[in-house]
Image: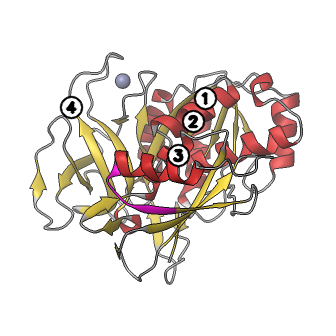
Amino acid sequence: MRIYSTSGTTGDPCYIPLTAGDLAAWIEISSRSYSATGLRRGQRAASTYNAGPFVAGAALDTFAQLGLTHIPVGTGNTERLARVLQTIRPQALICTPSYAQYLGEWLKERKIDPASLGLQRISVAGEPGGGEPSFRSNIESTFGATVCEAMGIGDVSISLWGECDQQQGMHFSGGDYVHVELIDPASGEPRAMSDGAEGELVYTALRREAAPVLRFRSRDHVAIWTEPCACGRKSIRTRCMGRTDDMLIVRGVNLFPTAIRDVVAGFRPEVSGALLVRSTAPGIRQEPPLPIDVELGAGDSAVPGLAERIEAAIRAKLIVSTRINLVPYGSLPRSEYKTKLVKH
Ligand SMILES: [Zn+2]
């Protein structure tokens, strides 16, 4: 019925075919996960995903199934999105966590208070990081809205996990359709799905008709929780720390750039929250101190000792030595989709 393709940033695009049954299954799984994030029938919801060639477009089918009053805005037009937020006043916004952060800045620069727009819910997906405590609470206080995250994977299902109001990780939503396992990313050996376990997620399609995958490695490095959730859902929960491809190893310590971003976010408003890790060696192994550009907050000049305080906080929380280079506000790239946090 449909053939999506991957972006092919590291080579030729791969094609992802779906039969009518496959698409119906994606919509069912994704409806479960997006509904966990607080999207409800009759709610006005603005989305920022393009229909384009990529699987994210299938989320639009899901929003119809959920019965949302869907306002598709697409990627790449913040002006248009701001106008929608001001005039149609949706209760919900669906975007990447990077874009939610950028949108908050964009509005403030134009003297629009994001909290005045009446957004109640921001459902974030598309990249890891939406569940990091400091990063999340900054977006929540900026907009006065609850932020819940969802996660999927193109080869398996557009959305596959969704976080409930408890904000204790994303619930697995692929039951009956997808089997999920946890493995040790280095050895490939299975790991028990026990409360607090970490590893890489591996998926097997149980009912897929076109291009079913068998023990497909996600490259998503996650933590898993199995204890019952107060919301009543029985499914396991997860938080994605990052793609194993994004992981750096600094003198034996596994480091995800999203974890650095969360520590840096704790220094707002002295910093904007934007950062760029400048790797000094090709590949994942890096020598300390790891150089990181951290952007100052809007209108602020560097307060003496700020860089040292950030370095100390990262060392205390992540056990990694860094060298923070403070750069002017607005000098690091922003993204309306996914943000690259590491420059090799
Ligand atoms: Zn729950």
Secondary-structure class at tag 2: strand
Q: Amino acid at mark 2?
A: Ser
Q: Residues within 10 Å of mark 2 (few under 14, many from 20)?
A: many
| Residue to which mark 4 is pinned | 226
- Asked whether residue 44 is in view, the answer is no
Relative to residue 52, is residue 107 drawn left or right?
Answer: right
Question: Alpha carbon of mark 1 to alpha carbon of mark 3: how far?
Answer: 15 Å
Which SS class for mark 1? helix
Residue at 71% x, 25% y is: 119
Where residue 59 sits in the image (x, y, percent)? 56, 46
Residue displayed at 45% across by 40% down: 132
Q: Are the residues at dot 4 and dot 1 in contact (C-beta closer than 8 Å)?
A: no
Q: Is residue 90 left or right of residue 186?
A: right
Mark sitting on residue 125 = 3
The quadrant in which residue 280 appears is bottom left
Per the model, the C-alpha gap separating discs 2 and 4 is: 23 Å
Left or right: residue 148 versus residue 100 is: left
Residue highlighted by disc 2: 123
Q: Which mark lies nearer to you, 2 or 1? A: 1
Is the image coloured rainbow, by chain, by secondary structure, or in one colour? secondary structure
Return the x and y of residue 242 as percentages of the image width and height.
40, 55
| Residue identifier under label 1 | 140
Q: CA distance from mark 2 to mark 1?
A: 11 Å
Q: How far apart in space, not on screen, are marks 2 and 3 (Cα)?
A: 7 Å
Report the span colored magenta: 317-323
Please, what secondary structure does the residue beneath circle 4 have?
loop
Was residue 276 drawn as part of the magenta stretch in this picture? Answer: no
